[in-house]
């Protein structure tokens, strides 16, 4: 089993239950969950402060939407890999997220396998990049 402690993750969702579920799933595979935020503003501030490898970002949130947060974070941290976590499969939203530079999509309702498969794919990209620059 891969050691995932070297992959840091920030979870952003306005639903506390969703954040908790994601945290438990990720920690079960030893991912390093370094923070959680409940809205796009907090996501931006935490991303800058904590510099995670991966951000799991909900699309629909109060104040600042996930799409807006995605664009703001990518402006200052183009290297961070952001995955949208959402029940919204609207083509316009998906296209906008892809255009803004997401690295993956997790559709709600999700199960542990879906989350871990998606995060593992993105984590693999991070490891490849690290090996290439080592």
Image (cartoon, grey):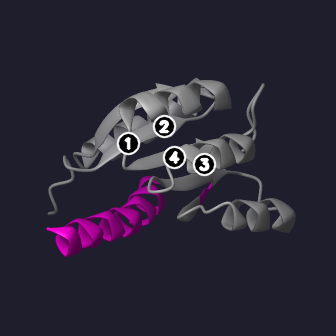
Q: CA distance from mark 4 to mark 1?
A: 10 Å
**Marks 4 and 2: in contact by CB < 8 Å?**
yes
- Magenta stretch holds residue 12: no
Q: Residues within 10 Å of mark 4 (few under 14, many from 20)?
A: many
Which is more foreground, mark 4 or mark 1? 1
**Marks 4 and 3: in contact by CB < 8 Å?**
no
The numbered disc on residue 75 is: 3
Upstream in sequence: badge 2 or badge 3: 2
**Which type of secondary structure does the marked residue at label 3 adopt?**
helix
Q: Residues within 10 Å of mark 1 (few under 14, many from 20)?
A: many
In the rendered image, which residue does mark 1 sit on? 52
Q: Residue 77: x and y, percent?
A: 49, 48
Upstream in sequence: badge 1 or badge 2: 2
The numbered disc on residue 56 is: 4
Q: Which residues are magenta?
A: 106-134
Q: Name the main secondary structure of what is drawn in magenta.
A: helix
**Marks 1 and 4: in contact by CB < 8 Å?**
no
Q: Is residue 19 visible?
A: yes
Q: Residue 85: x and y, percent?
A: 61, 50
Q: Quadrant of the N terminus?
A: bottom left
**Marks 3 and 2: in contact by CB < 8 Å?**
no
């Amino acid at each position: 089993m891969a050691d995932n402690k070297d992959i840091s993750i920030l979870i952003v969702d306005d639903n506390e239950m969703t954040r908790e579920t994601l945290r438990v799933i990720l920690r079960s595979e030893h991912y390093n969950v370094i923070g959680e935020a409940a809205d796009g503003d907090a996501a931006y501030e935490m991303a800058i402060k904590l510099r995670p490898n991966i951000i799991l970002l909900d699309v629909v949130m109060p104040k600042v939407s996930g799409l807006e947060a995605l664009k703001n974070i990518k402006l200052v941290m183009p290297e961070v890999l952001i995955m949208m976590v959402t029940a919204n499969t609207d083509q316009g939203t998906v296209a906008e997220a892809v255009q803004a530079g997401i690295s993956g999509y997790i559709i709600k309702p999700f199960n542990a396998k879906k989350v871990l498969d998606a995060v593992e794919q993105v984590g693999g990209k991070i490891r490849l990049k690290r090996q290439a620059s080592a």
